[in-house]
Amino acid sequence: MAAISVEPCTFALFGALGDLALRKLFPALYQLDRANLLHPDTRLLALAREPGSAQEHLGTIEAHLRRHVTEADIEPAALGRFLGRLSYQHLDFLQPEGYQALAEQLPDELPLIAYFATAAAVYGAICENLDKVGLAARTRVVLEKPIGHDLESSRRVNDAVARFFPESRVYRIDHYLGKETVQNLIALRFANSLFETQWNQNSISHVEITVAEKVGIEGRWGYFDKAGQLRDMIQNHLLQLLCLIAMDPPSDLSADSIRDEKVKVLKALAPITGERLSTAVVRGQYIAGYSDGKPVPGYLEEDNANAQSDTETFVALRADIRNWRWSGVPFYLRTGKRMPQKLSQIVIHFKETPHYIFAPEQRLQIGNKLIIRLQPDEGISLRVMTKEQGLDKGMQLRSGPLQLNFSDTWRSTRIPDAYERLLLEVMRGNQNLFVRKDEIEYAWKWCDQLIAGWRNAGDAPKPYAAGSWGPMSSIALITRDGRAWYGDI
């Protein structure tokens, strides 16, 4: 990364011994330090409720750093500098007494960044305790998802934070917004007239957004069974991707200009109610099957499972946006666990040319596709039609890519993890990549009507074998419109 001016701060990580902090946040902070993107005076403070000595917990953090950062990226000098910034303090987040000790050890001149890698239920208490000891006025707070489990509970969490922090100092994380390819959506759309002039219902047939996970629950039964795939993935990640694809050009690149346009998209989403629930939405739950040729249990057979659970592990749906730009253009969203592969991609399907002159049997091949891959290999590919090479081929057509693969194109440059970018932007005070309160609320409002519809209809999730692309009805959902999911095997 190029050098970026970042002010010094104290970065306090609440929940520092949790899985997110150990697996993602500390490695991201280390990589920023290794790239010389942390100010020399920046301090890192690990806060957790677990008993034990500070030395023991710092040792745990270092051990996880070595586990989750590639061996090639562990540089002794950088690691020593990073660990030298880091200190640990035991803190009961709900008790005001410990916050006074926290305030006394923080330099008065440095702003505080408080990252809440904790349950959302304690966000309000942490904010209140920071305010009681006079720290709120110089603090930015970073909130991890999920923020509530429906509109009402999300408002309670956000209102509890808003008592002490204005919106300008609240940073709500959606780590998908930190991915390199997601950032490139802005440049791709608005810096290239080739795309922006075609980015509407006149030229685009339909859009697919797929976020597939190969893994199952991975020991998160307690959380996931209360949430389900709709709350866990669609309410935040997939709707954020939909907004970036569908939004109108912002007036500038400021945080509120971008977020204003995203809110317009969320407000324009057509509700899915009544009879449309049975045709426009599919929920599924994986049963036993195979992953990489090995047998894996079904959702109800996972450790600590409730055998009566009707929580969905898969959702596919058709979303329609009620505005001029997208009138008649369906957005097909699909996400699930125990899929055949780990895959996050957006596929923009362009309409056929109005006058077809080639062989009739090749007509199904026609249609340009812009494929935006978020994982596993970040990149952008535009599939175009060309002629097959060879004297004997005549005008036989082939579909081939004009491709930008980030890892291949910039082989010498490590692609930063999404959390690295997001943490850096918090330190810079830039809210572009973070979610505003009204975005959260409109997304919940749209998802709540789906959940209420399922509940009122008594709709049980449909079974699908682990290692497959979901219930057969998810295929019918898109084929009913004369289309097919791109790339399914």
Image (tube, helix red, strand yellow):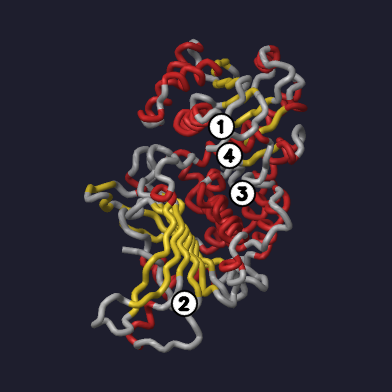
Q: Give coordinates of residue 176: x percent, y percent.
A: 53, 47
Asked if residue 96 can be seen in this view, the reply is yes
Residue in the image at 34% along x and 74% along y: 398
- Of mark 3 and mark 1, the one earlier in the sequence is 1
In the image, which disc is placed on residue 150? 3
Going by the numbered disc 3, the residue's amino acid type is Asp
Secondary structure beneath label 4: helix
Per the image, the residue denoted by label 2 is 481
Q: How far apart are marks 4 and 1 (CA)?
A: 14 Å
Determine whether, in the image, residue 67 is placed left or right of residue 41.
left
Q: Is mark 1 on a helix, strand or loop?
A: loop
The image shows residue 269 at horizontal and vertical percentages of: 63, 64
The type of residue carrying mark 4 is Leu
Name the amino acid type tagged 1. Answer: Ala
Numbered disc in front, either 3 or 4: 4
C-beta proximity under 8 Å, tags 3 and 1? no
Residue type for callout 2:
Asp
Residue, x 55% and y 44% (percent of image)?
Answer: 178
Residue 363 lies, with reference to residue 127, above or below; the image says below
**Residue on which disc 1 sits:** 117
Judged by depth in the image, the label closer to the viewer, 4 or 1, is 4
Measure the C-alpha gap from mark 3 to mark 1.
20 Å
Q: Horizontally, is 255 left or right of 72 in the view?
A: right
What residue does disc 4 label? 422
